[in-house]
Image: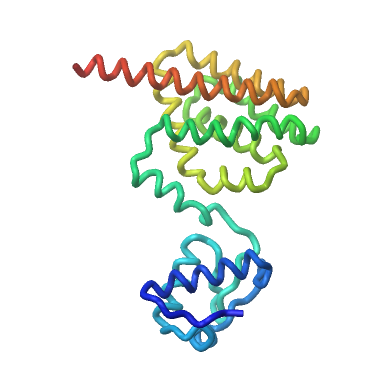
Amino acid sequence: MFRPIKDVKVYEHVIEQIKNMIMTGELKRGDKLPSERDLVEQLQVSRASIREALSALQIIGLIESRHGEGNFIKEKLDQNFLEPLSILFFLEKTSPTEILDFRLILEVNSAALASKNATPEQILELQAVVQDLEKYRMDENLNIKLDKKFHYTIAKISGNRLLFNILNTISDLIDTSITYTRSNILMDPKNLEILIEQHKGLFSAIAKGDAELASTRMKHHLDYVNKCMMEQEENNLLQNE
């Protein structure tokens, strides 16, 4: 049950209690929260604090307000739930290299799991993306979208919902990373063919069910992206001197 609150940042404690009740199973997806009046009485705080907490929970996508019905724990948590993490990265001006390091942690394991867990239908889905990357190689706007889809699809077919949800919920960050790195890498035209071959090789390892090879190729791909990006940044610095 809710506990009375006495503190300066009251709304944060309201949020914390609701989150804890979800973690313990006291509140589940789709459950209706008590009315604002009931929350005021149970938590012994002001209605303003309750509204501030509910507003924050709506912003991060944990709850939704239904007109005339009240506030509910979301049935399906969408990408807004962890999107503030993307905002944090942007505000702190995280370097592209740091973002790639973060992607390495997630995506190397994602590739290994995908090779173990992908269904025949999912393999065909990933294959279609790779084929489109090769077919439309000269359409960079489309290629950016296909590159993103390739990495998200691997995360999806990994079978690990937490990993996929984390990647999906920081989509703005990942999208920016892919767009930025491609724009730098493709300043050297020969890199386009290399990227296509790396995606094809990664798909092949996943299709074979070779987890070690898949993780190795994903690491090699992201390391190569990082190397090209650093070389391009060095060239830019030399040109500006």
Q: Is residue 92 above or below residue 28?
A: above
Quarter of the view holding residue 22: bottom right
Q: Is residue 155 above or below residue 195?
A: below
Report how many numbered discs are placed on residues in the image.
0
For the residue pair 17 and 37, the one nearer the viewer reads as 17
118 relative position to 19: left or right: right
Quarter of the view holding residue 198: top right
Q: Is residue 171 above or below residue 154?
A: below
In this picture the colour scheme is: rainbow
For the residue pair 141 and 241, the one nearer the viewer reads as 241
Quadrant (top left, top right, bottom left, bottom right) of the C terminus = top left
Position of residue 131 measured from the top left corner of the image (x, y, whole percent): 65, 23
98 relative position to 163: left or right: left
238 relative position to 175: left or right: left
Q: Give the residue furthest to the front.
A: 6
Position of residue 93 measured from the top left corner of the image (x, y, whole percent): 34, 40
Position of residue 235 measured from the top left corner of the image (x, y, whole percent): 31, 15
Residue drawn 45% across and 25% down? 182
Residue drawn 60% across and 48% down? 165
Position of residue 18 measured from the top left corner of the image (x, y, whole percent): 56, 71
